Amino acid sequence: MGERNAGSFGIIARKSLFCLFTVTSILFILSWFFVLRSTGRPHFIDHTLLPNSKLLTAAVDNGSIATQSQNDVEPSIGNRSILVYNEEEESSSPQDKEPSQAKQGMECVTNDKVVLKVFMYDLPPEFHFGLLDWTPEGSSVWPDLRSKVPAYPGGLNLQHSIEYWLTLDLLASELPNAPNPRSAVRVHNESEADIIFVPFFSSLSYNRYSKTNPHQKRSNNKMLQEKLVKYLTAQKEWKRSGGRDHLIMAHHPNSMLSARMKLWPATFILSDFGRYPPNIANVEKDVIAPYKHVIRSFVNDTSDFDSRPTLLYFQGAIYRKDGGFARQELFYLLKNEKDVHFAFGSVQKDGIHKATQGMHSSKFCLNIAGDTPSSNRLFDAIASHCVPVIISDEIELPYEDVLDYSEFCLFVRTRDALKEKFLINFIRSIKKDEWTRMRKKLQEVEKHYEFQYPSKEGDAVQMIWQAVARKVPAMRMKLHKSRRFSRSLVRKERGLRSIPSPGNFW
């Protein structure tokens, strides 16, 4: 009898516990339901607990974690922050805003202003404007842009002049009533900066001073690079980060040949990766920038498919090294084709003027790999509204994370282009409607490849700064990871017992 009573008591106790658990669960679910209704959507992430993010922030929509667009990110608080703002949003009321902003990605985020904070070294003039024969006045190492802007040499020097335009843009950001909009501003406290800018005109140094004089063992260009390495590696900013947050311009393929192997942790601005080993420069770490086109822009272009008599145009050096072998092969395949212009050309004997006329009157312009995967010819074609035909298997293109080049360029693999009649038949298959659509897109994007001072919204200067800004989060993550065990290493060097960091427990 006692055993039966004990069993009954156990059953009753279990039922009571089950009922209590059920009621508690229902109350818990109801409480969450009312909380969620009061907030309007589920917020499974408390953003106040996230670290200061610069360009990316975690968000939750429709029950899944997503990445916020730059429009949704508020300016972060504290040092080393990238500020994000939208002038149109500030000036308009919520009901005036479009429900969908999907097209902004194709507009290269020109409406989402990313203001990059840049600390620029005050390098001596011999590294920058002194190479332009500019002489400083007094103790200043920079020209006064309010009185005169030092001129850059013309001709082919202009192709790799990005170092000049970016430095001017940073200096202009400090002027009273600085031109707007801005994608980068100079700051004088490196702890506030997102990136450290090295104002060395490396391409100009190579173009002007790479040859040795009879009494020299080393060229002035090489000596400048050695001085730059010595200067940078001695700076506290470099020592703090190992150079990971530094930005170095080496747009000419042969610039920085001596220094690049020692400064590789930095982010390089390059024209391509043709003469770099992948551990020194790669698309994940570095920024590809456009050449400055050397032919005239096609202003007030009223031409159309029928008024451009040349089907396919190429003029330049035909016999090249490395990947440029395709040029001579294509020359023999195309030289006798009707309405195709394929000829040797150079900047001499009015070559630039002739190339301008030729591209402006052609439907398609060939961009074939030369000694390196890229050439200025692509950007000359864009400025001419001549649809580029790219035959360069290893080419990397500027801003390709925000621009779809297939909308205004044709790509042909080298092995296919070298097949008999393949290329010419492919070009002839592009009909008037498709060409017209691509040419219209060229006119829309051409502003992204224009270098000018002062810079304007969406031009090459602003686009390069924005491309650099998109590298900053990954750059910062690498820098933070490199510091994981720095404290334990210091304690070990001091002969003290190393204390495991909290990260070791995860």
Image (cartoon, rainbow, N blue to C red):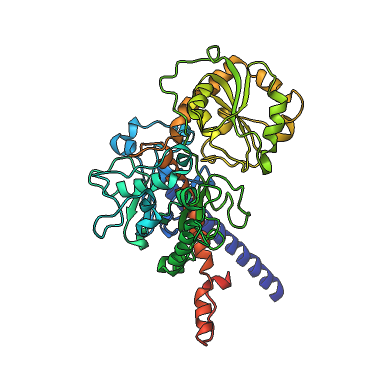
* Residue farthest to the bottom, as pictured: 495
Residue extending furthest toward the top: 306
User: Which quadrant would residue 271 be assigned to in this image?
Assistant: top right
Image location of residue 308, percent across then percent down: 54, 15
Residue closest to the eye, 148 or 186: 148
Position above or below: 137 against 438 = below
Q: Could you say which is closer to the camera, residue 102 or residue 204?
A: 204
Quarter holding the C terminus is: bottom right
User: Is 413 placed above or below 6 here?
Assistant: above
Residue 222, given in percent of the width and then of the height, sits at 50, 59
Nearer to us in this view, 264 or 320: 320
Quadrant of res 394: top right
For the N terminus, the image quarter is bottom right
Would you place residue 313 above or below residue 479 in this image?
above
Residue furthest front in the image: 214
Instruction: Establish if 174 lies above or below 261.
Output: above
Q: What residue is shown at x 36% (from left), y 51% (from top)?
A: 129
Query: Is residue 40 in view?
Result: no
Left or right: residue 418 versus residue 279 is right
Q: Is residue 174 left or right of residue 297?
A: left
User: Where does the image place residue 426, in percent across and percent down from the top left?
Assistant: 69, 22
Specify whether residue 289 is in view: yes
Q: Residue 239: percent from the left, percent from the top? A: 45, 69
User: Quick one: 206 or 324, which is closer to the camera?
Assistant: 206
Residue lying at 52% horizontally and 75% vertically, measured from the top left: 501
